[in-house]
């Protein structure tokens, strides 16, 4: 693999570890990898590493490693219970051991480090869309934004958040739509993600022609709800 191919491959593996699957859609995968200019070439060379099941992609080796982790966590839980029984003066259950040897010792909290990578990726993607870019010097705003991204990742996947950002960009930057208010990223996370998810048809909802079919009062109320 080239350096670019290896980077895209590892990025997709990180998403797989957290989400459990990847969309079987080259355009969505391209977004997850940061829209590299030579994506078609990169994907054609790493596509064979994944297998598809319906509209989702999986990775056999990654599934095996996740299963090892699941078994290790379960044994760790049981070991903790038995150790507690010994400390309380109870005999451990027959056939059990208080000594646990994991298949391998994780060097870091995979979940925590992956979430940090996702936060950085979302901020970088936001900045590529040129909507009130988040600058490195804005330390307080970056911390506030990171906290909000970390919270929203419990409800939405990285794929959904990136798609919502792209939809929001297309709407506010085009004269075809009546919504033009530009949020900062933390404001968008607070107020905009549900409205700009692809499944909610934002590009249809904000068309100027559709606005004409509403009363001025309805339009004012709608805009007030979204910018307050």
Image: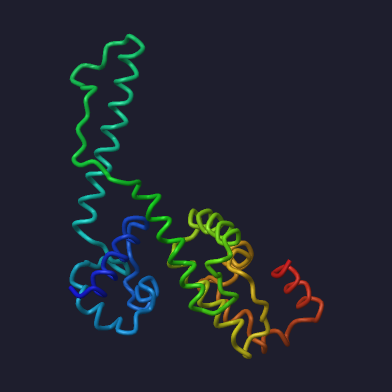
Q: Position of residue 112 (x, y in %)?
A: 40, 50
Q: Position of residue 32 (x, y in %)?
A: 38, 70
* Residue, far front: 137
Count of numbered tags: 0
Q: Quadrant of the C terminus?
A: bottom right
Which residue occupies 19% across, 58% down? Answer: 60
The answer to whether 8 is drawn above or below residue 153 in the figure is below
Q: Nearer the viewer, residue 131 or 43?
A: 131
Q: Would residue 93 appear left or right of 183 to someone viewing this image?
A: left
Q: Nearer the viewer, residue 31 or 176?
A: 31
Q: Nearer the viewer, residue 130 or 137?
A: 137
Which residue occupies 33% across, 23% down? Answer: 81
Which residue occupies 51% across, 79% down? Answer: 129
Which residue occupies 19% across, 56% down? Answer: 61
Q: Would residue 122 appear left or right of 186 to someone viewing this image?
A: left
Q: Position of residue 52 (x, y in %)?
A: 25, 68
Q: How is the image coloured?
A: rainbow
Q: Would residue 64 appear left or right of 130 to someone viewing this image?
A: left
* Residue, far right: 217
The answer to whether 30 is drawn above or below residue 96 in the figure is below
Q: Quadrant of the N terminus?
A: bottom left
Q: Would residue 27 appear left or right of 195 to someone viewing this image?
A: left
Find residue 175 and report its image quarter.
bottom right
The answer to whether 113 is drawn above or below residue 89 in the figure is below
Find residue 18 and report its image quarter.
bottom left
Q: Position of residue 126 (x, y in %)?
A: 51, 72
């Amino acid at each position: 693999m080239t350096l670019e191919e290896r980077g895209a491959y590892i990025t997709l593996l990180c998403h797989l570890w957290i989400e459990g699957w990847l969309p079987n859609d080259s355009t969505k995968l391209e977004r997850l990898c940061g829209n590299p200019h030579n994506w078609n070439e990169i994907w054609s060379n790493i596509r064979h590493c994944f297998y598809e099941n319906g509209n989702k992609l999986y990775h056999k080796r990654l599934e095996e490693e996740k299963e090892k982790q699941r078994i290790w966590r379960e044994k760790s839980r049981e070991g903790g219970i038995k150790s507690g029984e010994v400390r309380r003066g109870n005999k451990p259950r027959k056939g059990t051991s208080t000594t646990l040897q994991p298949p391998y010792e994780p060097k870091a909290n995979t979940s925590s480090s992956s979430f940090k990578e996702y936060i950085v990726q979302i901020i970088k993607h936001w900045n590529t869309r040129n909507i009130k870019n988040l600058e490195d010097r804005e330390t307080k705003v970056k911390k506030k934004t990171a906290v909000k991204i970390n919270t929203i990742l419990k409800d939405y996947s990285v794929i959904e958040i990136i798609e919502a950002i792209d939809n929001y960009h297309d709407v506010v930057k085009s004269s075809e739509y009546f919504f033009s208010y530009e949020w900062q990223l933390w404001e968008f996370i607070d107020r905009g993600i549900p409205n700009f998810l692809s499944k909610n048809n934002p590009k249809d909802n904000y068309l100027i022609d559709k606005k004409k079919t509403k009363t001025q009062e309805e339009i004012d109320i709608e805009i007030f709800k979204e910018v307050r």
